[in-house]
Image (cartoon, rainbow, N blue to C red):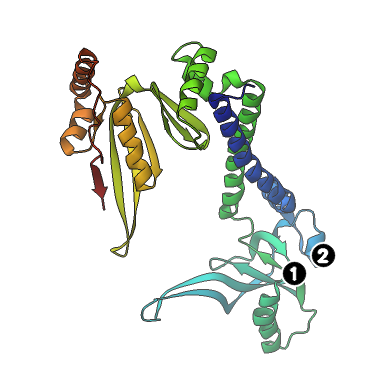
Amino acid sequence: MHDDYINNQMRRSTRNLLLFSALPFAIIVLLGVQNHRFLANLLKGSRPLSGSELLNIQDSEDLRQYNVSVNGDQLIPTTFQKVLRTKSSTTNQVTRTDVEQRFSILQIGDRYLLVSSKDPLSSPSLTGGLVAIPLEVREHVLGPIEKKNAMSDQAFLPFMLNTAEFSNGAWGWPVFGLLLGTLCATGIALSTQWSANPAQHPIAKQLRKYGEFNIIRGRIDSEVRLEGNLKASAPVVTSSWFLAPSPFTLQVRSLGELAWAYQLTTQHRVNFVPTGKSYQAKIYDRQGRLISIQAKEQIVQALLIKIGQKAPWVVLGFNAGLENLYKRQRDQFLAAVDQRKAALKAAPSESPKPQAKKPEPVGVA
């Protein structure tokens, strides 16, 4: 691949897409491997487990399929709950109380199974995951129950049933991971394809709209070199082109396509207190397409001034009338732009003056 501006941009965007896709994909795969037992049980669904089979289990971690449905003799509710209390930051008063876990006891013959649930239970027929009893639950729930009822350590089975383990909500993260993994795999495939065949890169497809790819690429490179050393991520205005790099592509417009540009200033507030401003250059073309570039105020203003110098027919600045005309009556807006361009061509000896030294911004609170 040649070492010119366009191919450097293609390499940069391809590399960014590969890194952006490969790192999350690797994390998803790692999490999938670490949680393969849970995922396999979630997909298989619950299997019926008889009372005798349940009593013979020594360690729930040894079960390949711990997503089970069990039928007990009696369900005994308890008053033990895990409660989340939300307090006001100003008064320190409790404003909301949510029950995260409720604990019940399922009697099976002369043994007992501790049951955790989100909602109250009424039936001794239960479905969930057989899991190890957390230390917190053992200390604050199981221990007090055994002490209060004078039960031996052998009365309770050495694991508990968590009915929320495989509830409908358990599908949320796996489904999200599957969707994200699919997007990441697509990104990896695209970056691999673009590396093997640069002609399929979106930047190359953009340039082919203007003519033969290699010819346009050469013209852009020669004009960019005249602008001096620029950052790969910086927007460029040459004598014929407006080039706006973004992390995964390069937006290309011939100067003749540009119609309107202005600075957008946004005032940020937290609890009605100003916390700073952000600045954007908004550049619209004749087809209604927008290129938005966020940068420091000085960079935004310098970019708009340069557009005014290189493409003086472009309307600079913002007001409600211009916005309404461009969005609702674009033909009239473009006709005015064409008149400006024709007037400039009719007077070639006159050097065009910048429309504004400091383009008029519009603030948005």
Q: Vertically, is 54 above or below 280?
A: below
For marks 1 and 2, the one nearer the N-term is 2
Q: Any mark on residue 299, and which?
A: none
Q: What residue did someone put label 1 on?
A: 159
- Disc nearest the viewer among 1 and 2: 1
Residue 11 x/y as whole percent:
60, 30
Residue situated in front as seen by the camera: 230 or 9? 230
The kind of residue on which mark 1 rests is Phe
Residue at figure coordinates x 58%, y 79% from the top left: 80
Instruction: Report if the CB atoms under discs 1 and 2 are less than 8 Å apart.
Output: yes
Q: CA distance from mark 1 to mark 2?
A: 9 Å
The kind of residue on which mark 2 rests is Ile
Tell me the SS state at disc 2: loop
Side of 131 where 249 appears, left or right: left
Side of 22 where 54 appears, left or right: right
Tell me the SS state at disc 1: strand
Q: Residue furthest front?
A: 349
- Within 10 Å of disc 2 (Cα), the crowding (few <14, some 14-19, many 20+) is some
Residue situated in front as seen by the camera: 135 or 355? 355
- Within 10 Å of disc 1 (Cα), the crowding (few <14, some 14-19, many 20+) is some
What is the quadrant of residue 280 in the picture? top left
Residue 202 x/y as whole percent:
52, 24
Q: What residue did someone put label 2 on?
A: 57
Residue at figure coordinates x 46%, y 11% from the top left: 211
Residue 88 x/y as whole percent:
39, 76
